[in-house]
Amino acid sequence: VEVVESGGGSVQAGGSLTLSCKVSGTIFEDNALGWYRRAPGKQREMVAHIGRYGSTDYADSVKGRGIISRDNAKNTMYLQMTTLKPEDTAVYYCKVEEEFTNGEKFDYWGQGTQVTVSS
């Protein structure tokens, strides 16, 4: 399974970014997906999650500013972030949650994409 994030960059506070996560090597529509981030000196935290059927969940810190979505035809997940703040600065990671027929689960991670928000 290959997981590749893109779309990160440097932006000023108040700006917007859309991150993409392209997945291959798995049946994309069968997997739940998530965006996580790790800020300097902090632990990795969940930003947003989307289930197989489109249910979503967000960290309190991004509610109202982030939208997670998926395009099963393109094997791609997105995270639209608006009103970015300096505290959103982090490496953003995509997680693919694969569940096997025997009930076992395995997570696949991308290499991450850097988002830097300047004040």
Image: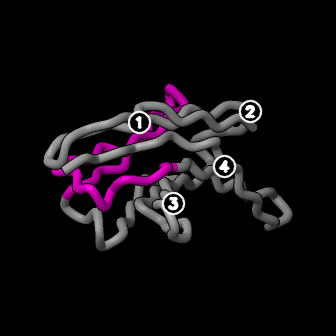
Q: Which residue is mark 2?
A: 25
Task: State the separation of the CA atoms marked 3 and 4.
Answer: 13 Å
Q: What label sits on residue 109 in the rendered view?
A: 4
Marks 3 and 4 in Cβ contact (< 8 Å): no
The answer to whether residue 116 is above or below residue 97 is: above
Task: State the separation of the CA atoms marked 4 and 2.
Answer: 13 Å
Mark 3 element type: strand
Tell me which label, 3 or 1, sits earlier in the chain.
Answer: 1
Residue drawn 25% across the image and 47% down it: 118
Q: What label sits on residue 96 in the rendered view?
A: none
- Under mark 3, the amino acid is Arg
The tally of labels here is: 4
Q: What label sits on residue 8 in the rendered view?
A: 1
Task: State the separation of the CA atoms marked 3 and 1.
Answer: 13 Å
Tell me which label, 4 or 1, sits earlier in the chain.
Answer: 1
Task: State the separation of the CA atoms marked 2 and 3.
Answer: 26 Å
Mark 1 element type: loop
Q: Which residues are magenta?
A: 65-92
Query: How far across and down, in percent of the image, does residue 110 sit?
Result: 63, 43
Query: How far across and down, in percent of the image, does residue 31 sit?
Result: 61, 50
Tell me which label, 3 or 4, sits earlier in the chain.
Answer: 3
